[in-house]
Structures are given as C-alpha cells and as structure tokens.
Image (cartoon, rainbow, N blue to C red):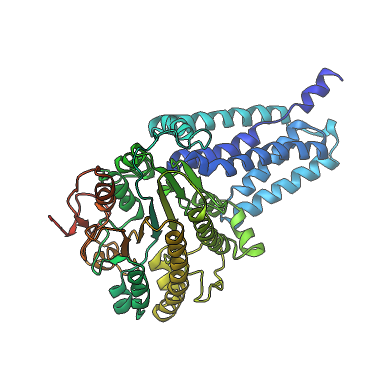
Amino acid sequence: MSLSTRARMRPVLYPVGILAGFVLFLLVKSGVSPYSAGRPLLIALGVGLALPWLFGLLVGDRDRAGILAILVVMVLLAGQSALAAALLVGILAVLLAESWTGRAGARRIRWPLITRAMSAVTAILLVAIGILAVQNGGIVRIPRDLVAEASIGRLGSSATAATVAHPSVYLVLLDGYPRADKLGTEFGIDNEPFVQALQDRAFTVAATSRSNYQTTELTLASMFSGRVPSDPEADTATIRPFISDGEVIREFRDLAYEVVAFSSGFEGTALRGADRFVDSGQINEFEWELLQLSGLAPVLDIVAPTLLADQHRARVLATFETARTLASEPHEGSRLVFTHVLVPHSPQVFGSDGAPNEIRGIQVPFDDSDEYTILGPDEYDRQLAGQIAYLNGRVLELVDAIARADPNAVVVVFSDHGSGIREGVVTGGSDPDLRTANLLAVRCPGRQDIIDDRSTLVNLLPRILRAYTGSGPEDVPETIYGEPVDGKYVVFDRPD
C-alpha cells in the first residue's frame, strides 16, 4: 500500500469532534451529572466516527468523506430551522453528485486544505469548551462527580457496621401533588378518601402543611442539607451538592444507613451519589433538551409523535414496580430510600384506570401553567383528577408493600410543592399560596410528635433522626418563601 493511499484512508476526526463537542458544551453549561450525558456522548462518538467511514466507502476519498459527514452532522444540529436543514441537505446532494460524477483532474476544490481548516476549527471549539469548563468550575466538578457518583465500589463505602438497629426510612416524593384542601377548592377534586386511607395505615397527615420553597431543587436542598444556596441566581451545578452530599444525608450514612435513590428523569434533583442509584433507562432531562435542540425533533414528531410522553409514563411505572420489589427484597441494616416520581406534576399522562393520555410531540408541557393553558380549566381539572386517582392507588400499593416487608419502617409520602397553574400577584412567579400548599403524610411507628398540622419539610429528616437514633441536626426556622430563593419575599414564617 502506497503512502498516498494510506493518507487517503486515515480517519477524519473533525465530525466526531463537532458532535462530541456539542454534547460536552451542554454538559458543561448545564451543570448536571456527567453520567446523564453518557448515552448521548457515546452516540455522538459512534455517529461521528461512522459517518466519515461510510462516506469514504462511497466516494473513496477521506477529505470529501469528511465534508459530507460534517454536513450530515450540521443537519442533525440544525435544530428547528427547516430552511437551514434544507440548505444543508442541498449542499450535501451537490457534493455527493460532484464526488460520483466529477473527474478528479477537473476538480478545483482543494479538499485537503478544507480538511485541515475544519480540523483547526474543531480544535478551537474544543479548547473554547475547555475554557468554559475552567471558568464555571466544570473542569473540577465533572471529574469529581465521575468519582463520587460511580457505582463501582460505592455500596457501603461510607457506612460502618451498625451497633444499634435503626428503622429504615422510605421517602416517597410525588412531584407537584397539591394539598387536599387546595385540590377541592381549586380543581373540584375530593381527595379525602386518599387522606383517610393513609390515616387508616397509621399515617399522620398535615392538614395545612407547606413546602419551604417553590422549586423541587431548593426543597430537596433544604431537606437533605438543612440549608440552601444563598446566591439568588443559584444554578443546577451550585444546588446539586446540597442535594447529593448534604449534611443530613451524611448523617444517615454515618449511622450506617444504605442510601438508595430512584431517578425521576430530571437531573437537577437526582441523588446520584446514593449507594445505589436506580435508573430504569428512559430518556432523561439532558437527553430531552438535546432532542429539542437538534434537527431530530421534527423528525421524531412525525415518526414517533408520543415518544416523550411514553418515556415519561414508562419511567413512572418502572419506578413504582422497582420500589415495591426493593421493599420486599431481603437486606441487612437500615436503609434511606428516596423514591421520586414526576406525577401528578404535568404532563397528565395517566387516566384514572392507568390508560395513557395521548400527548404528542417533543415539546411535552412539563410546566403546570403551560398545560393548564393548552387544555383549558375544565379539561385540565378532569385530567388531573384522573391522574391523581390512578396515582393514589399505586402509592397505597407501595405503602402496603413497605409495611408488609418492614412493619417498623418510617414512611413519608410528600410533595415538593403544590400546583403552579396560577401566577402570583406580588412576585410575578407562581401564586405562593397555591404553590407551597403541599402533601405531607408521615408513618412513624411508636412516635406521634414528628409533624403537626402546620409542618414544613426542612426539619422533617432531622426530627426523624433525633426521634429514632438520638442524633441529628438541630431544627432551623421553618420559613416559607414566595420566590424559590432564600432571602426573597417571605410568605409565612414559623419561628416555632
């Protein structure tokens, strides 16, 4: 094989560099766990390497194969612009025709020069992403998260052998579940049968409970660490350590609890640093954002119009099934199990019998107010009632499975916030009265003093720790904020 032939067969790397760089840029910018980007990054690497090779087989020249491959990559990244995609497809067709019909001696395009230029542009792009990673802390955060959230060798690594058996604690987070009285006054839904069913199972239900914050991220940050970031513009990367490595979580680990967490699909709230992180494998938030930005979105809207809603529904069902299995499996020692399901939060994907509500398109309305506007008040109320009716049955099944397997377990059924359908008058965000009116029910065998009718979430886990283990962080003020930022508009304040 001649030297020139070997040169023509060398792989062209700038298409894979562009595709991988796109994924890496979003990873660095978003601040989510690097493990959430693992699948997209592998796909980018595979597609970016395969395209030049396939085009090389067609045209027999690495330089032209690289140009054809990068045009396909640009079509994939063209987003929602039909004009840009059509233009790129046209250029691709012209270049393919030139490659197949033109005579090598007649070509005036200097393909090797284009290859060198594109390689230089790609290198500059990757360096720019590296600079961004340095500027926003990603250069430290991503390697740290890769180590801290790795599943290999993590189980039991932070816990010593327990000398006293403490009760396991099961947290069942029903995202966006409104308080019973608000369900009645706002949506015409009578949820008292569910409340009574919980009380019949020895739960204490807080009649006027509230979440301390209006967002899931800050609610969990306060629950798992006893505090929240003071930065009024705190981003995902800033908040995540308060959730994954909060002081309260560390307290459970110090008491030899095995921490188990389920993925809701939303990475900003994922407890990926758990001893066991359970992900059923459906599309996660990071991948959803990638699809929305890419040129695949309009294609998927045609060939798989219910993909996102189906994936969301499948994750909820898988979480309930796996959580029931987990509760029944034999195990030694105590557990802290965090089960997070993104229902009854929008979108309303379940009917009252569990049958799917068909929601089409990549742009699934995960915001309550968006879905409320799309459906209208009457249809929204009807669909919310159906989703809650189905959800209530699944929750009671899970609670019963936990109680059968472990009668002494502490079980908390709660929501991170209430409904966000209505805007607030003062803050311009969600109405704080409706948004902070959450569900809170606690089954605490042998204790009746963990919560009262007016409890919030911030002191819940420390009180459980102190009640059953004799140690735990002290209470902090149970302030409720109208904006999801500490120090902003205060709706209520509980100095007790």
Front-most of residues 304 and 222: 222
Q: Is residue 361 shown left or right of residue 427?
A: right
Front-most of residues 84 and 190: 190
Q: Is residue 183 visible?
A: yes
Residue name at image x 21 percent, y 59 percent: 449
* Up/down of 418 relative to 288, above or below: below
Q: Quadrant of residue 102?
A: top right
The spot of residue 390 in percent (x, y) is 48, 72
Q: Is residue 442 shown left or right of residue 352?
A: left
Please state the total of marks drawn on the protein image. 0
The spot of residue 447 in percent (x, y) is 25, 58
Residue farthest left in this picture: 495
Q: Is residue 106 shown left or right of residue 350?
A: right
The spot of residue 312 in percent (x, y) is 53, 60
Residue name at image x 70 percent, y 47 percent: 91
Instruction: Give the quarter of the figure containing the N terminus.
Output: top right
The spot of residue 151 in percent (x, y) is 52, 37
* Up/down of 399 relative to 235, above or below: below
Q: Is residue 366 visible?
A: no
Q: Quadrant of residue 384?
A: bottom left
Residue name at image x 38 percent, y 68 percent: 369
Q: Quadrant of residue 188?
A: bottom left
* Up/down of 354 relative to 490, above or below: below
Front-most of residues 278 and 32: 278
* Up/down of 260 relative to 150, above or below: below
Instruction: Give the quarter of the figure containing the C terminus.
Output: bottom left
